[in-house]
Image: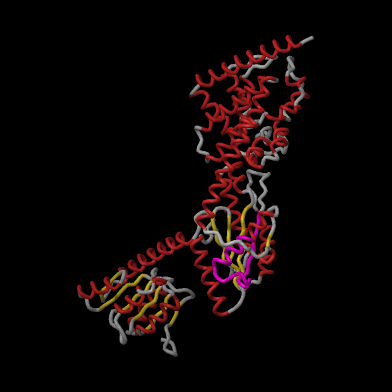
Amino acid sequence: MSANGGPIVVGDGLDILIIDDDPTERALLVQRLARQQYQVAHAATGAEGLRAVYQYRPRIVICDVLLPDMEGIDICQRVRADPTLDGVYIIIITAYDSGRKKQRALAAGADDYLAKPYDPNELRARIRNGLRFHRLQERLQRVALTDGLTDLWNHHQFRELLDKEYQRVRRYGGALSLLMVDLDHFKSINDTYGHEVGNQVLRQTARQLLRAVRDTDYVARYGGEEFAIICPETSLDDAAFLGERIRLAIHKNVRVETCADLAVFTSVGAASASDPRVGSVGNLIDLADQALYESKRNGRNRVTRADQIGERSEAPVRLDEVDRLRKEIHSLSLRTKELCLQSVWALIQALEARDPFTAWHSRNVTLYATWALERVDWGAALRKATINAAMLHNLGKIGIPDALLLKSDELTPEELATIRQAPLITCKILEPLRVFETEIAIIRHLRERFDGAGYPDGLVGASAPIGSRLLSVIEAFDSMTGSRTYRTGIPIEDALVELERESGSQFDPDFVRLVVQTVQEDRARWQAQILRARKGCAAARCEVERVTRNSAP
């Protein structure tokens, strides 16, 4: 016991608290446990022991059943009545090996029971069990309070922490600010590069946020690609400055090794509890959210302070109504995209009257991509965007002169280079249609090579969008097996051999294997489509020639 009668602590942290009124027994136990490198505290009375429990939050409490001021069973009941002490493992020790005492102790919340004189080896084993239990409790608590992907605080814990900080400011004064951080066009990242790349971006963003903030700040994943930062004792000016630092750090440092062209931009909203519009935690969140969406409305990739947006005169909208409207807008967006897609597809089919080979090539690449994607575990959005890109990628041939499209002789290297610009022309045509953002990224990089010798950006390996890498293999297969005016398509087997020969140089080996396996396991279906396309092209060509002859003067 210390000079002032309080508990003695041995070590810097606390593994074990011993509560025992026998000084000899207590000193012996402290000595044994200290030799085993445990951090130990000890107390002689129940009142001292309870104070030590609240002060040190020990992992294990070893408590004598009989104390001068209360029973060890009373301490069990007091500890178990406080949910903040749920993780404390309690071992009751008694000189009376009574079955009734044991039952009372366990009923009061003790985790273990040991009779004196006890075997030191048995006590060590019970302590190991207690520490193992405590570690499990800590892991479970961590899982319950944190986001599994980013290891930041989750939405539930964010609200708990913000409530606590808000009440502190309201009771004692001081400053409190909140930042809402959202990754711009994150859906496009998922759709273009795949969800695993999206997850890497989220994890790296979380690391950048933790590096940028102070130890006293709290960083949480608010939901999806949106993060929240609670900034105690921080003015709105300082919070906005922090938001700008975060915005720049994320753009500069969030990089995925396999996606060299991937750039991450961020919109931020900042609000302060001192704002006169804030009368509750919900108000503070709403205000920070409004500032965030003001950043979005003004072009994204910026920080907006809540005092930069005007007072809203509209009545507050119920959350369920907001959710309903979001779903309705999403549904309308999908229908709008589908209508745009149908219109553009009609334009592509109109090419058939001018160039039947282009029209059939678009049909085949779309169909072959659909068949290949049946064998991969991609998300629905990425799968749909890849099929759309297959359908649309040849639209740019509208900008290619007829003399090249309809040339009956083999094309020169310069002419081939012009034809291969069609995907970039397609991107320019589709660019005003923001609903095709992901498809545009896939089409833009169709001519990249796995070895980095392609264009337009010379992307290496998996840095090209995943949809681009698959479609480049499928497009090459159809180009080789489809007939042209100046040549007949080669057999399936020869085309597969050529794909394998270019695997690792022109094409991604994974997608070469996928296409080869898909063709070989369902060869009849692929062969039937090749023959159908050849006949369709021949018939269309005859019709074009007939119309041309009849219209000649």
Left or right, 377 with reference to 197? left
Q: Residue at x 52, y 39 (%)?
A: 378
Q: Residue at x 55, y 37 (%)?
A: 383
Residue 194 lies within the magenta run: no
Q: Is residue 507 visible?
A: no
In percent of width and height, residue 45 lies at: 35, 85
User: Magenta stretch?
Assistant: 266-290
Q: The C terminus is located in which quarter?
A: top right
How many marks overall?
Answer: 0
Q: Is residue 145 visible?
A: yes
In percent of width and height, residue 524 lies at: 50, 19
Residue 285 lies within the magenta run: yes
In percent of width and height, residue 364 lies at: 59, 24
Q: Residue at x 29, y 73 (%)?
A: 108
In percent of width and height, residue 503 lies at: 61, 30
Quarter where residue 385 is shown? top right
Quarter where residue 404 is shown? top right
Quarter where residue 487 is shown? top right
- Measured along the vertical axis of the image, is residue 395 above or below residue 250? above
Query: Which residue ends up furthest to the bottom in the rendered image?
Result: 3
The residue nearer to you, when weighing 230 against 417, is 230
Q: The N terminus is located in which quarter?
A: bottom left
- Measured along the vertical axis of the image, is residue 504 above or below residue 136? above
The residue nearer to you, when weighing 74 against 315, is 315
Left or right, 13 with reference to 256? left
- Measured along the vertical axis of the image, is residue 258 above or below residue 372? below
